[in-house]
Image (cartoon, rainbow, N blue to C red):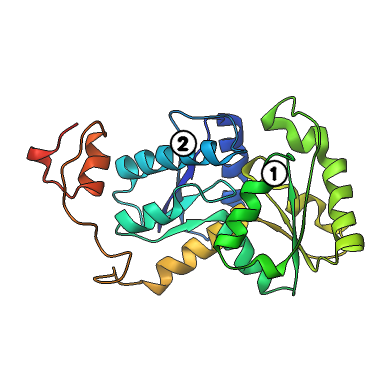
């Protein structure tokens, strides 16, 4: 089994965090290909940045998905997830959706622990889009600028644990989601300090991606995720044009 794991942000430090946790979550024989967005922002906090990250993820997936069995979008908020499911012939898993579904299997209400206050609006809209707002106990987030996105766990680990403890004591959370790729691996290292289960989106996504490959879903021939109609494209890379516009290679407009 071969999985393509995409960091839709430009931070290679975050990609290394994702890879370390992803490798702890793979079965024997599962191979990983790690990819970092070639353009965009260091970490996503806003709707606009999510759109940019989604486009970057689409471009990377279009160029690299061949010979892989599934794709993982490794950013909380799942930028580009629905679009990738629409154009790719293999399963696509997002770390947010994976973590939310897993949380619902372990408790009635979950809280999300995030790295910034600004990120909250986009996270709430993402959770609402999955129809799970009623299961959300709270979103608690750090309230100061991040000095280095790749060192959030070292710099803010104790504060993140304190936020998680408050989410349980004050908000009634049964399950905690330590959100965002910069926190990859934190749930594993602090689980013993927390009173309820703590989930890592990368861990959840890797396990679910492997399960999706095992399920061998058939490609949809109908419904909203059926193959998009053919049309002319302009200004897109060749690989993405072929997926979005369904154009033969000889007629692709790059």
Q: Is residue 77 visible?
A: yes
Labels 1 and 2 touching (C-beta < 8 A): no
Question: Element type at marker 2?
Answer: helix
The residue at the point 82 percent across, 45 percent down is: 160
> Toward which corner of the image does residue 85 lie, by quadrant?
bottom left
The residue at the point 67 percent across, 31 percent down is: 150
Residue 169, horizontal then vertical, whole percent: 92, 62
Is 64 displayed left or right of 157 in the figure?
left
Q: Which residue is mark 1?
A: 183
Q: Which residue is mark 2?
A: 52
Determine whether 147 is above or below 163 in the image: above
Residue 165 — which label? none
- Residue farthest along the right direction in this orientation: 169
Residue 7, horizontal then vertical, whole percent: 51, 40
Q: Residues within 10 Å of mark 2 (few under 14, many from 20)?
A: many
Q: Quadrant of the N terminus?
A: bottom left
Residue 23, horizontal then vertical, whole percent: 57, 50
Separation of residues labelled 1 and 2 (CA atoms) = 21 Å
- Residue farthest along the top direction in this orientation: 147
Q: Is residue 35 visible?
A: no
The residue at the point 89 percent across, 56 percent down is: 165
């Amino acid at each position: 089994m071969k999985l393509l794991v995409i960091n839709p942000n430009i931070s290679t430090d975050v990609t290394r965090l994702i890879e370390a946790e992803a490798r702890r979550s793979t079965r024997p024989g599962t191979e990983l290909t790690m990819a970092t967005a070639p353009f965009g922002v260091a970490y996503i906090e806003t709707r606009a940045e999510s759109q940019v990250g989604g486009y970057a993820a689409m471009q990377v997936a279009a160029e690299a998905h061949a010979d892989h069995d599934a794709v993982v979008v490794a950013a909380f908020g799942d930028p580009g997830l629905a679009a990738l499911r629409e154009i790719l012939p293999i399963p696509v898993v997002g770390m947010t959706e994976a973590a939310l579904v897993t949380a619902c299997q372990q408790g009635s209400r979950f809280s999300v622990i995030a790295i910034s206050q600004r990120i909250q609006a986009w996270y709430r809209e993402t959770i609402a889009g999955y129809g799970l707002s009623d299961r959300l106990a709270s979103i608690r987030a750090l309230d100061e600028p991040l000095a280095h996105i790749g060192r959030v766990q070292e710099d803010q680990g104790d504060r993140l644990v304190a936020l998680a403890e408050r989410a349980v004591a004050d908000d009634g959370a049964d399950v905690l989601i330590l959100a965002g790729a910069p926190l990859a691996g934190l749930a594993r290292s602090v689980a013993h300090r927390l009173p309820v289960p703590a989930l890592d989106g990368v861990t959840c996504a890797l396990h679910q991606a492997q399960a999706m490959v095992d399920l061998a879903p058939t490609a949809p021939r109908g419904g909203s995720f059926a193959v998009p109609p053919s049309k002319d494209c302009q200004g897109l890379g060749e690989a993405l044009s072929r997926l979005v516009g369904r154009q033969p290679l000889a007629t692709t407009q790059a």
